[in-house]
Image (tube, rainbow, N blue to C red):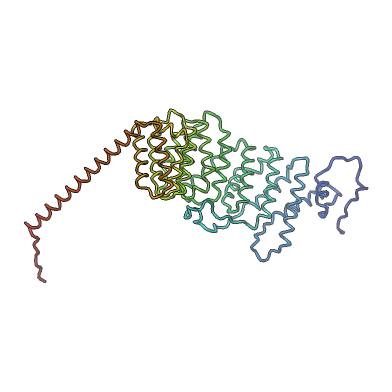
């Protein structure tokens, strides 16, 4: 049989004004001829194209030619054009075939991390090095097809192809090291969450499991920032009063995320999620502040700077009724940071005193709180090596003295009394040790050690 011939425009019936999927395919792909003798023939050609796109190129196999890869990319582009131009939603066997093609291309074994310790062992780096996958030239178009299907297909029909297994596999792709794929995947996953109302609980639970596994097991996952960005939009839509399930997510997942070594990679998204909770229910601010203080880093200065900024934002949204309860632990930690030998940490902590809410909290606190602050200021002025830190400390001291000179003076007196008592205790301790040493020497003089000879 000879190859099928194109139907010339003059032979088409002028009465047909509506365009079929077959006509669109011909228009968008003039070099890809579809026989018009029957609809079945056109569908067969369409299924053939989808089937061709199901073949996955690894981009590492030497037997794969660049021409074959370009051919597949062209076929994928033609499928996108058909979907974009079609006025009717895709359904039936075409939808099933497209879903199978999407699954074959996206759900693949991801390569092992190029540098497994890139995030956990390099805390000073703000972001790990990005790895760009050669498969992206194909994957980008496949994601575009998936997004088009999600946007244009009825949820009940699409539900036949996008089930829980599909959603789990999609979530696993957030482990891809290619930031382009994670960015696109984030938009697709959130779009599915918005459309599939009945599956929202399952999707939240699945994302929670990934975050918990990261915090308590591996601390290795390149897509935590992207997942938290999705969570930020989800939390933003929570109604008030918050459900107990959502509060537990804050306490058991978001707060422990502050303790990981790679926190600075996703801290911006994490802080946004936490702030959304506190804005909706300010009473949760106390839980969050205590949680952040519990996981305060000991040796990571970059994390300290980030957490000081987060605490400053949290203070803005705190319920004033909690000021007295939180003043002592919060001011104690900030004072420790002011006394830090790292000048960046010390300066960032001193800038907290520019925050009116923080100053208000410190002044509302008890005399004990103010004594901690005064002691930290005087210690900095006397011992800190950085001139800029000493200058900032002097400015804060002047501000505090102007606000409440009597309280500051009392703090100085209490500090001097404390130092005097510590000095007396030190003298007593030294005298006690001297007496013990004298008694030991006297005992040795009166009872010299006897040696017993052992004969062999």
In-image side of 445 versus 84 (left or right):
left
Q: Nearer the viewer, residue 229 or 173?
A: 229
x, y percentage for residue 280? 52, 31
Residue 378, quarter of the rendered image: top left
User: What residue appears at the point 62 percent right and 35 percent down from the top-left corner?
Assistant: 197
Above or below — where is 137 with respect to 452? above
Q: Quadrant of the N terminus?
A: bottom right
x, y percentage for residue 172? 57, 49
Residue at the far left in the pictured view: 446
Above or below — where is 381 with respect to 243? below
Above or below — where is 106 with respect to 20? below
Q: Nearer the viewer, residue 409 or 202?
A: 409
Q: Quadrant of the C terminus?
A: bottom left
User: What residue appears at the point 17 percent right and 48 percent down from the top-left corner?
Assistant: 431
Residue 368, quarter of the rendered image: top left
x, y percentage for residue 294? 40, 41
Q: Nearer the viewer, residue 138 or 449?
A: 449
x, y percentage for residue 215? 47, 46
Q: Nearer the viewer, residue 149 or 36?
A: 149
User: What residue appears at the point 92 percent right and 42 percent down from the top-left corner?
Assistant: 14
**What count of labels does the image hold?**
0
In-image side of 345 versus 83 (left or right):
left
In-image side of 118 versus 146 (left or right):
left
Residue at the far bottom in the pictured view: 456
In-image side of 285 versus 83 (left or right):
left
Residue at the far right in the pictured view: 10
């Amino acid at each position: 049989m000879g190859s099928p011939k194109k139907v010339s425009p003059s032979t088409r019936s002028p009465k047909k004004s509506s365009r079929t999927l077959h006509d669109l395919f011909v228009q968008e792909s003039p070099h890809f001829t579809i026989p018009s003798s029957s609809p079945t023939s056109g569908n067969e050609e369409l299924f053939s194209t989808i089937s061709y796109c199901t073949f996955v190129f690894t981009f590492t196999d030497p037997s794969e030619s660049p021409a074959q890869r370009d051919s597949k990319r062209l076929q994928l582009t033609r499928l996108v054009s058909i979907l974009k131009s079609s006025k009717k939603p895709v359904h039936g066997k075409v939808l099933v075939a497209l879903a199978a093609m999407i699954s074959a291309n996206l759900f693949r074994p991801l390569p092992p991390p190029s540098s497994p310790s890139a995030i956990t062992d390099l805390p000073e780096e703000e972001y790990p090095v990005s790895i760009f996958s050669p498969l992206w030239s194909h994957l980008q178009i496949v994601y575009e097809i998936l997004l088009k299907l999600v946007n244009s297909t009825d949820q009940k029909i699409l539900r036949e192809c996008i089930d829980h297994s599909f959603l789990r596999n999609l979530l696993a792709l957030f482990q891809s090291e290619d930031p382009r794929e994670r960015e696109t995947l984030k938009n697709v996953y959130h779009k599915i969450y918005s459309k599939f109302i009945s599956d929202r609980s399952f999707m939240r639970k699945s994302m929670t499991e990934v975050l918990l596994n990261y915090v308590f097991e591996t601390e290795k996952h390149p897509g935590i920032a992207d997942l938290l960005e999705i969570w930020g939009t989800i939390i933003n839509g929570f109604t008030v009063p918050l459900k107990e399930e959502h509060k537990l997510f804050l306490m058991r997942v978001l707060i422990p995320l502050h303790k990981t070594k790679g926190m600075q990679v996703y801290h911006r998204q994490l802080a946004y999620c936490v702030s959304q909770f506190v804005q909706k229910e300010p009473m949760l601010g106390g839980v969050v502040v205590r949680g952040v203080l519990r996981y305060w880093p000991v040796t990571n200065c970059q994390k300290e700077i980030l957490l000081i900024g987060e605490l400053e934002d949290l203070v803005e949204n705190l319920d004033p009724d909690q000021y007295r309860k939180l003043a002592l632990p919060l001011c104690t930690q900030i004072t420790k940071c002011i006394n830090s030998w790292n000048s960046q940490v010390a300066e960032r902590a001193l800038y907290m005193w520019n925050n009116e809410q923080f100053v208000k909290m410190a002044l509302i606190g008890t005399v004990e709180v103010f004594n901690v602050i005064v002691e930290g200021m005087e210690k900095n002025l006397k011992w800190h090596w950085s001139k800029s830190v000493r200058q900032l400390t002097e400015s804060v001291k002047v501000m505090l003295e102007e606000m409440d000179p009597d309280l500051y003076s009392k703090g100085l007196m209490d500090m001097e009394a404390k130092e005097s008592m510590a000095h007396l205790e030190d003298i007593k301790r030294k005298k006690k040790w001297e007496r013990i040493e004298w008694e030991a020497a006297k005992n040795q003089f009166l009872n010299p050690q006897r040696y017993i000879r052992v004969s062999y």
